[in-house]
Image (spheres, rainbow, N blue to C red):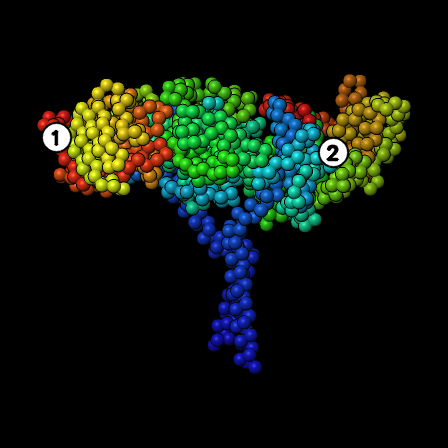
Amino acid sequence: MLSLRSSQRIRIAAAFVFATTAIALANCAPAASLHNTIRDAQRKVVKIYGAGGLSGLEAYQTGILISSEGHVLTVQSYVLDTDDLAIVLDDGRKRKGELLGSDPFRELAVLKLQLDEDAALPHFNLNAAPTASVGDRVLALSNLFNIAGGDEPVSVLHGVVTALAPLDARRGAFESAFRGRVYIVDAAANNPGAAGGALVNWQGELLGLLGKELRSRSTGAWLHYAIPVDQFIDAVDTMRRGESLGAGDLAGSAPAEPLKLADLGVALVPELLPRTPPYIDAVHPGSAADRAGLRRDDLVVFVEGEATASYAAVVEALGRHEKFDAVRISVLRDGELIEASLDPEAAVDESDASEAESSDEQSGEKALEEAQRDGTEEEAGE
Amino acid sequence: MSRVAIVAALALLLCTNAVARGAIEPGPAVLVAQKARANAIAKASAATVAVFDSSGGGGGSAVIISPDGYALTNFHVTAPCGPAMKCGLPDGRLYDAVIVGIDPVGDVALIQLLGRGDFPTAEIGDSDDVRVGDWAFAAGNPFLLADDFTPTITYGMISGVHRYQYPAGTLLEYTDCLQTDAAINPGNSGGPLFDAEGRLIGINGRGSFEKRGRVNVGVGYAISINQIMRFLDHLKSGRIVDHATLGATVVTEEDGSVVVDDILDTSDAFRRGLQYGDSIVRFAGREITSANALKNVLGVYPSGWRVPLVYRRDGQTFSTQVRLMGVHDESELIALVQHEEENPSEPRPDELPKPDDGDQPDDPDEKDQGEQPKLPIPGVADLLNKPKMPEAVAKRFEARRGYANYWYNQQVQQRLMRRYLERSAVQGVGYDWMLVGDTETADGFRLDISKEGAKLQLPNTGHFEAEFAGDLSQQLSPPRTGGLLVAINAWQRLIDKGLRRFGEVYYLGKLPHGPDNRVEDCLVGYFEGMEVRFFFAADTGDLTGIELFAADDADPCEITFSEFTEFSGRRLPKRWHIRHADADFAELVVETWEFNAAPADPAQGNQ
């Protein structure tokens, strides 16, 4: 009995030794297999060449293969505005690409490669994509600066997920429509041409898609970020079916109960013409609009920083928010831009907010000037 | 007893595991890795140099590769310095340094630090072994931060290999370079990129910046060390070194083949049979899948190098060896270099690296920054503010057209010649030789040669003569040798007249020659309008080959010597391999070698 037990213990001990050795080996292993992981991941990244090429508008970007039959996910941009899209695979094969569908909200697009052959292309599996946490080591794969010509594999940069935060950024004068959570990384991942590249973990699994070049709305710093897979996986399904997402069906982020004008206590001048200017016709006393100081005859020019040229644009912009969301609205009154924060839930006047917002706008202006000095004004072309 | 021991062992194992998982203190593996990394950095740092121009302004980085102080840096770092610069080492000391040779196309310069014979050196790695995903670190002096010359270390990953970066302006083309996300910033230029073990794999010189200002955005480029090592002896020649071209241009076709769309009829590639419409399959042992790939491989070879070429025509594959020609002619190269030295930011200010760093801002709006005052280096400026060339540098510098520093060329010329004459005891062999021996295929050859002419009797093929008077380019007998007898005459003249009186002679560097493509030191001499290349073995100092080019666009007569044997007290080659164009001409085996030395010969000094 005793001997049996001790032999069991020995076995247990041996198992432990084995386990610890295995752990130790596993710790060393990434160094050896990281090369292979990278090489495998590179094969799933493609280079996209299309419109552009003028004054700093690069005529190239990156994309990732998401199906064996040649579906490519990339960012929606001017590069895709051509009938002559060339997509270069990792092995240097050049194929034409056709735009299947796009998502103007996340600024994504799905292309389909025109393949003559029955190729089983290596691709990322969106459905098996894991999520990453702050501190996880990541790799960014893209054709930044179009360094990788022909059959050269795309560039690989290493880094760490430094934050998971809502995207609060702009490009030139325009704010990005997408406000979901993104991975912020410390690798210089988002350079010219990098948009549409892959952010992967050290196992080569896709974590997110590198976004377009954006600067932080508050600091003006260039952002290095990727949109997590779970933020776009449903939209990709829609685009793959060959459908484009409208502003109304922003799958995944469409509000359950969209915010309406009435919720804020505002009535606009009735929409008689297709582009009726959004003048406030009436403000309901005691409403959020009233508390924020909005008045009759104010012209609504921005909702959450988004330009609103018409009645319809205001309704649409508000509709992207939940019924209970606070929204920032900028109005033009006697030639002066006035900012207001409207909170349908709160009963407290937030007149302070308007000051804070206007100073923010100033810093934004400053950053914009800076951007133009740096030669970033080409971004305004988008 | 045993139970206690087992339990204790178990407890210990659990404990170690717990410590590792709890991250209270790093596991032993981490500490080992960290120590290895610290050691690699310490070793690498010792050989890293901070370079300043002699007035203490501007600067860059460099790395020492031999104990006698030879150090590699970027051409664009040395260009504004002139022949002298100051170099700081991590030991805190400042050394004088002199320019040795430059490769303006490849953006490489060789300098020599003076004042010590035991400089710390970097271990040379193999950049062809570098893979994407390898860890690497750059050492150097970004933003000229190090007052005490201790290099700044930036760690990163290899992002790409065999990258091609277009020339900035007319020069500074980066072919087959390494791409890293280790931060390469202004001031890192010319500094080393090391692999994780601290072996030198490249020289940092460029980055992609675009609109982000002039700081790193994750893309830096290093010239691969293998390319530089191939150029090293050329750089040691003190010359302005040129890169190579095939003499043909290619395009990538739709089907992925790389097709010749233009070819110079003066190129060796043309003479070796390459034609318009042929597709290049392999070049220098590398598969060619795009026009860019060819450009990439070409860029790592110096002008004059010989490489294997495989091409395809009508489904048939041909293999040959081609000599690469220079990209620029000499005066063109000199003009480019002068332009760069005098006016570094002129040709394309938005793309040319600035003299004080070395990077390539693409943003036109960054021009202003380049014109701002250079970064001051506190404490060093006064020390360096010497307008005159330091004496140690002046001793080792000689200006001459076509050279970065002619002094070094002369040193090698004299060394090669002295060793050859001493080791082979050929001084005074004169012009009157009679050689008798066999050929590989048949018996009996006889060569009679004198100052006036030569006669060669070969079995089967017959009797040939040459006169060494008048236009020697008309005396290229026997046919299909390219001028064997004249080549022997040139050899005699070199021994007799020495370096000074032979005609123009210079040291070229090392080039492959002969049937085995041995890479050996090459002296080039001109006489009677012809170019002769003499090859010397590094170990024995023997003259191992001669190549005679009767005209610029003619195939040379190639003689390769081997089996050095004693003939009348002199060390001379028994076996002569003679080749011209695409075919071997003969293999001579010398049995007897008689001299009728002219009495005046020993008095005529060499060199």
Q: In which quarter of the image is residue A330?
A: top right
Residue at (33%, 26%) from the top-left corner? B239
Asked if labels 2 and 1 share a chain, the reply is no
Q: Distance between the residues labelled 2 and 1?
A: 92 Å
| Chain holding disc 2 | A
Measured from the top left, where is residue B546 in percent x and y? 27, 32
Circle 1 packing at 10 Å, graded few (<14), some (14-19), many (20+), is some
Q: In which quarter of the image is residue B357?
A: top left
Q: Quadrant of residue B483?
A: top left
Q: Please determine whether, in this image, residue B286 is positioned above or below residue B58.
A: below
Q: The residue tagged with tag 1: helix, strand or loop?
A: loop
Three-letter code, disc 1: Ala
Residue A370 seen in this snapshot? no
| Chain holding disc 1 | B
Report the residue that reaches farthest toward the left. B599
Measured from the top left, where is residue B602 in percent x and y? 12, 29
Residue at (65%, 30%) from the top-left corner? A50
Q: Observer-nearest residue: B86 or B260?
A: B260
Residue at (51%, 38%) from the top-left corner? B315
Identify residue for label 1.
Answer: B597
Identify the mark at residue A104; answer none if there is no mark: 2
Quarter holding the C terminus of chain B is top left
Measured from the top left, where is residue B238 in percent x and y? 32, 27
Q: Observer-nearest residue: B355 or B291?
A: B291
Circle 2 packing at 10 Å, graded few (<14), some (14-19), many (20+), is some
Residue B437 seen in this snapshot? yes
Report the residue that reaches farthest toward the bottom. A1
Q: The residue tagged with tag 2: helix, strand or loop?
A: loop
Q: Observer-nearest residue: B516 or A34?
A: B516
Residue at (24%, 35%) from the top-left corner? B458
Measured from the top left, where is residue B385 in percent x and y? 34, 23
Three-letter code, disc 2: Pro
